[in-house]
Image: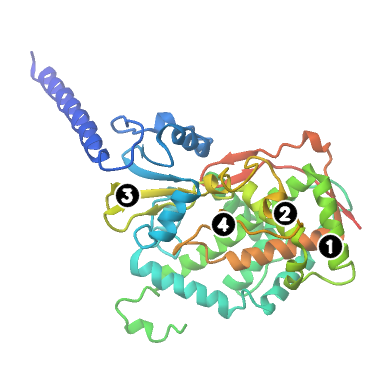
C-alpha cells in the first residue's frame, strides 16, 4: 500500500469516526431535549423538510412528536413550539428565558447583527425602548398620526381612481402607500409614487420578503451605549422594512380574499354606509362601531398568516420547559401559524370565516389565540401602527370603491404562493370601481 492510499484510507476512517461521534453526541444531547426525528450527520433533518413549504413540513413532524419537538437544520438545532398552549407558555410564562433572538440567515446577512430586530441582551433592551419611545413621540397611536395615515390614503385613492376601473396589479399600489407612512417616521418625508428609486427600493424589500418583513447628546460619554451610527441606521431600516412589507402584503392578501368572497365585501359596504356614510373620512373612533369590518380584518390577518414560523427566538440560559432541558443558545421556532390555526380556538381553522371573531349577537369577539404580532417581550412594537393602517386604509378603499376581479370568484386562488419565513399570496389583478 503506497503512502497516498494509506493517507486516503486514514482520512476515510477519521471521517467515519467523526460521523459516528457526531450522531452519538446529538443523540446524547437529544435525550435531555424534546423528542424529534433522528438527524443525519452534517445535514440534520433537511431531507425531511420541503423548502417551498416549511410550515406544512413542520406540522407533519408535529403529528408524530407532539407540540414541542427538536429538529436539526444542518448543524443548527431548533426547538419547535406548536399550538397556543406551548407558544404562550414559552413566550409569556417564561418570557425571560425565551427572550433571545434566534438566527434568521437572510436578515442577519442584511443587517449584520445591528439594529433592534435581531439584537440580543442590553443592545436589544436599549434599542427596543428607544424605538417604542420614538414611535410614541411621532404620534403613533394618537390622533395626529391617524391624520398622517389618512393623508397618505388620499394619495392611494387618487392612484386607484387613475386606473379608471381597468384591471391592475395592486402590489406596488399598496406598498407605496404603506411605505410612505413609515417613511414619514423613518426619514421625515414621503416619496412620489413614480419615483424610480423608491420603486426600486420597494421591489428589493419585496424580493427579500419573498426570499425569506431621547436625547443622544449624553450618549457619546456612555461606554455601554448602543446608540452608535450602525445601530441607529440599522434600527431605522428595520422599522422601514418591517413596517412596509408586512402591512402591504396583509392588505394585498385581504383584497384577494374579498375578491374571492364578494358577499363579505358587500357586508362591509353596508356597515360603512350605516356608520360612516360617504361624506366623511373614516376615523379610528369608527372601529368599535364596526364589528363586522373589524372581524374581517382580524380574519385576514389570521388566515393570511404573514409570519407563519414566527421570528426565531433563542433561550438565554439553560431552560426547563415541559420536563425537558433546552441548552442556552438553542434556537426556538414559536410557530405562530399553528396558533392562528389552532382548532381548539378556531372552529374552522383552514377556512376564511369572519365568524371566528364575532359572537352570536354579531358583536366583535376577542380570541386569545390571535397573535399575528407574536406575544411577550419580543412582540412587534409596531402593532398599534399596523392596526391603524389596516383599518383606515381598507375602510377608505371600500368607502370609495367596489372591488372586482377580471376572473370569476370561483377561479381565484387564495392559497399562498410562498410559505417560509413569510407568507405571500399569488400575484393577481383587480378592478377598483368608483362608487
Callout in the foreground (3, 2): 2
Give the mark, 1 or 4, whose residue is nearer the N terminus.
Answer: 1
Asked if marks 3 and 4 touch (Cβ < 8 Å), the reply is no
Give the mark, 3 or 4, whose residue is nearer the N terminus.
Answer: 3
Which residue appears at 16% of the width and 26% of the height? 11
Query: What distance separates the C-alpha of mark 2 from that of mark 4?
Result: 17 Å
Give the mark, 3 or 1, whose residue is nearer the N terminus.
Answer: 1
Circle 2 residue: 296
Crowd tier of the residue under label 1, counting other residues whose Cα lies within 10 Å: few below 14, some 14–19, many 20 or above: many
Crowd tier of the residue under label 3, counting other residues whose Cα lies within 10 Å: few below 14, some 14–19, many 20 or above: many
Give the mark, 2 or 4, whose residue is nearer the N terminus.
Answer: 2
Residue positioned most to the bottom: 218
Which residue appears at 33% of the width and 55% of the height? 315
Report if residue 118 is visible in the image: no
Circle 4 residue: 368
- Would you identify the image quadrant in which residue 128 lies? bottom left
Query: What distance separates the C-alpha of mark 1 from that of mark 2?
Result: 13 Å
Circle 1 residue: 272
Which residue appears at 28% of the width and 57% of the height? 317
Circle 3 residue: 330
User: Looking at the image, is 255 positioned above or below residue 139?
Assistant: above
- Image location (x, y in percent) of residue 196: 67, 58
Give the mark, 3 or 2, whose residue is nearer the N terminus.
Answer: 2
Of the 4 image quadrants, the one containing the N terminus is top left
Q: Which mark is residue 193?
A: none
User: Looking at the image, is 28 positioned above or below residue 401?
Assistant: above
Of the 4 image quadrants, the one containing the C terminus is bottom right
Query: What distance separates the C-alpha of mark 3 from that of mark 2?
Result: 37 Å
- Image location (x, y in percent) of residue 268: 81, 56
Asked if marks 1 and 2 touch (Cβ < 8 Å), the reply is no
Amino acid at each position: 500500500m503506497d503512502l497516498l492510499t494509506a493517507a486516503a484510507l486514514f482520512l476515510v476512517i477519521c471521517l467515519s469516526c467523526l460521523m459516528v461521534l457526531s450522531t452519538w453526541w446529538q443523540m446524547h444531547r437529544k435525550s435531555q431535549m424534546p423528542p424529534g426525528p433522528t438527524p443525519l450527520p452534517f445535514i440534520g433533518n433537511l431531507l425531511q423538510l420541503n423548502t417551498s413549504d416549511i410550515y406544512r413540513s413542520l406540522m407533519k413532524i408535529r403529528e408524530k412528536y407532539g407540540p414541542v419537538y427538536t429538529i436539526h437544520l444542518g448543524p443548527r438545532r431548533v426547538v419547535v413550539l406548536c399550538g397556543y398552549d406551548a407558544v404562550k407558555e414559552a413566550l409569556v410564562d417564561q418570557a425571560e428565558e425565551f427572550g433571545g433572538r434566534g438566527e434568521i440567515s437572510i436578515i442577519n446577512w442584511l443587517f449584520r447583527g445591528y439594529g433592534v430586530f435581531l439584537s440580543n441582551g442590553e443592545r436589544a433592551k436599549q434599542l427596543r425602548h428607544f424605538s417604542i419611545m420614538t414611535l410614541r413621540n411621532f404620534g403613533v397611536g394618537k390622533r395626529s398620526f391617524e391624520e398622517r395615515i389618512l393623508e397618505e390614503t388620499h394619495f392611494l385613492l387618487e392612484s386607484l381612481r387613475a386606473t379608471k376601473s381597468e384591471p391592475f396589479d395592486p402590489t406596488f399600489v399598496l406598498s407605496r402607500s404603506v411605505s410612505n407612512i413609515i417613511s414619514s417616521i423613518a426619514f421625515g418625508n414621503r416619496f412620489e409614487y413614480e419615483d424610480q428609486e423608491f420603486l426600486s427600493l420597494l421591489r428589493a424589500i419585496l424580493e427579500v420578503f419573498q426570499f425569506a418583513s431621547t436625547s443622544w447628546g449624553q450618549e457619546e460619554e456612555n461606554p455601554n451605549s448602543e446608540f452608535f451610527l450602525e445601530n441607529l441606521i440599522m434600527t431605522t431600516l428595520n422599522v422601514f422594512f418591517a413596517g412596509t412589507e408586512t402591512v402591504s402584503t396583509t392588505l394585498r392578501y385581504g383584497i384577494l380574499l374579498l375578491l374571492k368572497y364578494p358577499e363579505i365585501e358587500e357586508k362591509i359596504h353596508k356597515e360603512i354606509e350605516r356608520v360612516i356614510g360617504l361624506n366623511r373620512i373614516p376615523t379610528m373612533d369608527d372601529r368599535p362601531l364596526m364589528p363586522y369590518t373589524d372581524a374581517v380584518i382580524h380574519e385576514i390577518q389570521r388566515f393570511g398568516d404573514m409570519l407563519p414560523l414566527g421570528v426565531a427566538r433563542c433561550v438565554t440560559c439553560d431552560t426547563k420547559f415541559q420536563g425537558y432541558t433546552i441548552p442556552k443558545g438553542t434556537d426556538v421556532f414559536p410557530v405562530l401559524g399553528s396558533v392562528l390555526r389552532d382548532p381548539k380556538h378556531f372552529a374552522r381553522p383552514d377556512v376564511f370565516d369572519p365568524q371566528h371573531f364575532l359572537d352570536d349577537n354579531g358583536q366583535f369577539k376577542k380570541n386569545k389565540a390571535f397573535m399575528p404580532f407574536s406575544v411577550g417581550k419580543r412582540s412587534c412594537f409596531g402593532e398599534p401602527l399596523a392596526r391603524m393602517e389596516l383599518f383606515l386604509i381598507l375602510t377608505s378603499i371600500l368607502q370609495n370603491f367596489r372591488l372586482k376581479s377580471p376572473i370569476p370568484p370561483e377561479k381565484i386562488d387564495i392559497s399562498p404562493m410562498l410559505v417560509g419565513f413569510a407568507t405571500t399570496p399569488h400575484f393577481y389583478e383587480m378592478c377598483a370601481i368608483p362608487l
